[in-house]
């Protein structure tokens, strides 16, 4: 395929003989520099193809030194940005922040924390799915994976790692399991709760509960961080809830981001509100369409095509729930990598990587 694009991170998938050719051709110091900040999985491709243990040890040491240089470089850059931030002319800016190394980020994802406040209406007091507290967690997880596979859904994999994000949606009351598709369909049309007084459009953004069709009770689904085996879990959020929760987080800090910043809204001419509503269901099945459909937005001749992502993952470090959910909807590897590396803003990425 002459038109296929190959980036450096695709080294993760090349054959061993190609890795050997690199090792035999290039100086070890250059290889170490090339692997600065890359994932452990990519580095292992080189370690295992080195001719002896001593060479593997030497390359590890060289990379450790390079990593320290990389970390120092990023810290110095952030120090410069912090100085710029002290100037009154830039007081209203948010400044780039990022995880120094890919390994730092993957360690962050797998590190368990149970102190995060659940998101959404009536979330406090609503029972949650929990793989780690379930007596039949392995069985339920396998059942969910089979349902997802049958419906054509593949769990999101963090690029260049073995980490997957898998929905663990099991009713704690009766044990009924739900697929990813079932969660998405429910989030687009939830059971109206009389206790929620702000209407359906608002409930779509603020109610992260799932209503069990079997036992007729609400529960909070979970998103598992799986690295061969489950390592961590956070609350599962729908697309609209993820968007809203991130915007709420930044608004509390005094910033308008994503759809609350008008300059991030990417619109296109040529379709009216009525024409949009008359589109076939499969044509409406996208993030941008979902945003438009669930909001009281009625532009006369423009439709929302996407939302520019002006947030940094590092800014959400205190909210692993938001980071994991944001990643699971980032449907292209390059979009996820840009998020992890903190380059999504400078590359003008669209939220979730979707463009209708």
Image (spheres, rainbow, N blue to C red):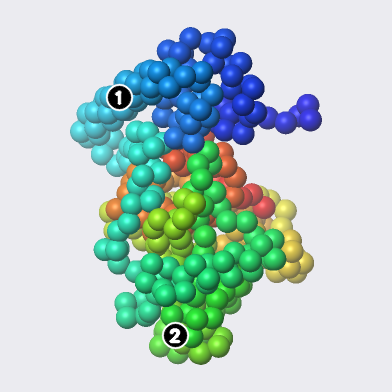
Place of residue 21 in the rendered image (x, y in percent of width and height, measured from the top left): 61, 16
282 left or right, relative to 174: right
Could you say which is closer to the camera, residue 263 or residue 103? 103
If the image is split into quadrants, where does the N terminus sit?
Answer: top right
Quick one: which residue is furthest to the front in this view?
52
Question: Looking at the image, which residue sits at the far right?
Answer: 1
Badge 1: few (under 14), some or many (20 or more) residues near its Cα, within 10 Å?
Answer: some
Indicate left or right for 194 with 126 as reference. Answer: right
The image shows a total of numbered marks equal to 2
Secondary element at tag 2: loop
Q: Residue at x 59, y 50 (%)?
A: 331
Q: Residue 173: give its label.
A: 2
Q: Position of residue 244 (x, y in %)?
A: 43, 62
Where residue 88 appears, as percent x and y from the top left, is 22, 35
Would residue 355 be seen by someone viewing this image from the given angle?
A: yes
x then y, percent, for residue 46 = 51, 25
Kindly tell me whether residue 316 is visible in this rendering.
Answer: no
> Which residue is at the front of the view, 81 or 215?
215
**Residue at left 72%, top 53%?**
270
Q: CA distance from mark 2 to mark 1?
A: 49 Å
The front one of 280 and 87 is 280
Q: Which residue is mark 1?
A: 68
Locate residue 112: give its quadrant: bottom left
Q: What residue appears at the point 34 percent right and 69 percent down from the top-left corner?
A: 118
Q: Earlier in the sequence, mark 2 or mark 1?
A: 1
Up the image or down, 18 lies above or below 256; here it is above
Q: Nearer the viewer, residue 65 or 213?
A: 65
Picture layout, residue 345 above or below residue 304: above
User: Residue 62 vs residue 16: left or right?
Assistant: left
């Amino acid at each position: 395929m002459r038109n296929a694009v190959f980036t450096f991170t695709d080294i993760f998938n090349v054959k061993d003989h190609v890795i050997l050719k690199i090792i035999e051709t290039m100086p070890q110091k250059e290889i170490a520099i090339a692997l600065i900040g890359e994932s452990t999985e990519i580095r292992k491709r080189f370690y295992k193809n080195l001719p002896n243990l001593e060479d593997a040890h030497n390359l590890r040491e060289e990379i450790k030194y390079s990593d320290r240089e990389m970390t120092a470089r990023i810290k110095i850059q952030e120090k410069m940005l912090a100085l710029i931030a002290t100037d009154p002319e830039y007081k209203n800016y948010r400044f780039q922040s990022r995880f120094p190394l890919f390994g730092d980020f993957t360690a962050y994802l797998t590190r368990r924390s149970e102190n995060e406040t659940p998101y959404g209406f009536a979330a406090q007091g609503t029972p949650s799915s929990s793989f780690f507290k379930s007596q039949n967690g392995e069985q339920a997880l396998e059942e969910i994976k089979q349902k997802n596979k049958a419906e054509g859904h593949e769990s999101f994999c963090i690029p260049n790692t073995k980490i997957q994000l898998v929905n663990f949606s099991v009713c704690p009351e009766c044990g009924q399991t739900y697929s990813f598709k079932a969660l998405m369909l429910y989030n687009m049309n939830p059971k109206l709760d009389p206790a929620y007084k702000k209407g359906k459009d608002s409930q779509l953004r603020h109610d992260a509960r799932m209503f069990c069709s079997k036992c007729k009770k609400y529960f909070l689904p979970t998103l598992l961080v799986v690295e061969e085996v489950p390592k961590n879990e956070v609350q599962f959020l729908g697309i609209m809830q993820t968007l809203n929760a991130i915007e709420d987080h930044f608004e509390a800090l005094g910033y308008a981001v994503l759809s609350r910043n008008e300059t991030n809204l990417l619109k296109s001419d040529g379709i009216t509100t009525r024409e949009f509503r008359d589109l076939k269901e499969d044509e409406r099945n996208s993030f941008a369409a979902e945003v438009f459909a669930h909001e009281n937005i009625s532009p006369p001749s423009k439709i929302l095509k996407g939302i520019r992502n002006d947030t940094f993952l590092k800014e959400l470090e205190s909210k692993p729930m938001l980071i994991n959910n944001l990643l699971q909807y980032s449907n292209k590897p390059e979009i996820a990598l840009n998020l992890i590396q903190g380059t999504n803003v400078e590359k003008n990425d669209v939220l979730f990587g979707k463009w209708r």
